[in-house]
Amino acid sequence: MKSSRVWVFDLDNTLHNAVPHIFPHISRAMTAYLQTHLGLDQAAANTLRVHYWRRYGATLLGLIRHHPQIDPRHFLWHTHQFPQLHSMLVFERGLRGLLRYLPGKKILFSNAPEHYARWVLQALGVADLFADVVCVERTGFRPKPAAHGFRHVFHVHGIRPSQAIMVEDDLDNLRTAKRLGMRTVWVTGASKSPPFVDVRVKSVLRLRRTLNKL
């Protein structure tokens, strides 16, 4: 019998570890972009990038709010280029086996731009296992933890929140997921979980052991 479960996966720091190489590369690229397109020196561009990230949760949102001359798609395309992507990815080799093992549809739901998300899934060798890739462009540049993108996923795929399991590294995103009625899995090295987290795992590979809790 086909499972009615729907697994909704985040990408960065959930399916792979973006901390060592990917995130630093993106930060440098964003700083360089602000230098070029806002006429700032490196120090001022980096300060503004960090300020918008801290204030709005994403540098992109600060640009949309304060710099309407910046095209969000242009910004995302030029700050998410990875000629050496395969050598920069850090992930566990059992990922494909885990995703094939989990019963039900799999959807990727990320605040990253779609071209980057698809590149990463391809490089991870799991692109064919996902029924859809929902990225920040599809949410009208209203990233998680805003509820808009979650509701878009529910509507497009005709699913009830109670069918869906959100697998994430970010607690703010999981809080929204739980409020909407989803089950929640926190990918973390933490030893304690807040009440809105149903399952805590150190790695997505450990989802095999938690199916009875979800």
Image (cartoon, rainbow, N blue to C red):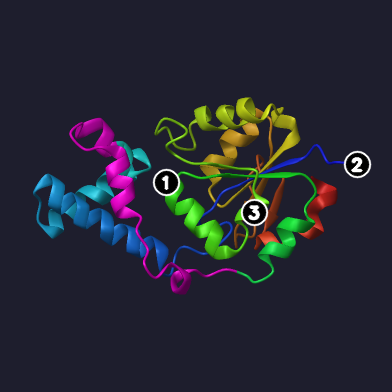
Residue 63, x across and y down, in percent: 25, 38
What is the secondary structure assignment of the residue under circle 1?
loop
User: Residue placed at 46% from the left, 32% from the top?
Assistant: 139
N-terminal-most mark, 1 or 2: 2
Classify 176 as above or below 82: above
Q: CA distance from mark 1 to mark 3?
A: 18 Å
Give the residue number, with chain letter if any, for mark 1. Answer: 113
Label 2 sits on what residue type?
Met
Label 3 sits on what residue type?
Asp
The quadrant of the picture occupied by the N terminus is top right
Q: Write down the region rendered in magenta.
A: 62-91
- In the image, 16 versus 97, the foreground residue is 97
Residue 35, x across and y down, in percent: 14, 53
In the displayed structure image, the side of residue 61 where residue 47 appears, left or right:
left
Q: CA distance from mark 3 to mark 2?
A: 21 Å
User: Residue placed at 56% from the left, 28% from the top?
Assistant: 152
Q: Residue 6: which disc? A: none
Q: Is residue 137 visible?
A: yes
N-terminal-most mark, 3 or 2: 2
- In the image, 19 versus 33, the foreground residue is 33
Give the residue number, with chain letter if any, for mark 3. Answer: 128
89 part of magenta stretch: yes
N-terminal-most mark, 1 or 3: 1
What is the secondary structure assignment of the residue under circle 2?
loop
What is the secondary structure assignment of the residue under circle 3?
helix
The quadrant of the picture occupied by the C terminus is top right
Give the residue number, with chain letter if any, for mark 2. Answer: 1
User: Residue placed at 65% from the left, 39% from the top?
Assistant: 196
Classify 178 as above or below 11: above
Classify 199 as above or below 178: below
In the displayed structure image, the side of residue 39 where residue 28 appears, left or right:
right
Looking at the rendered image, the disc whose residue lies closer to the viewer, 3 or 2, is 3
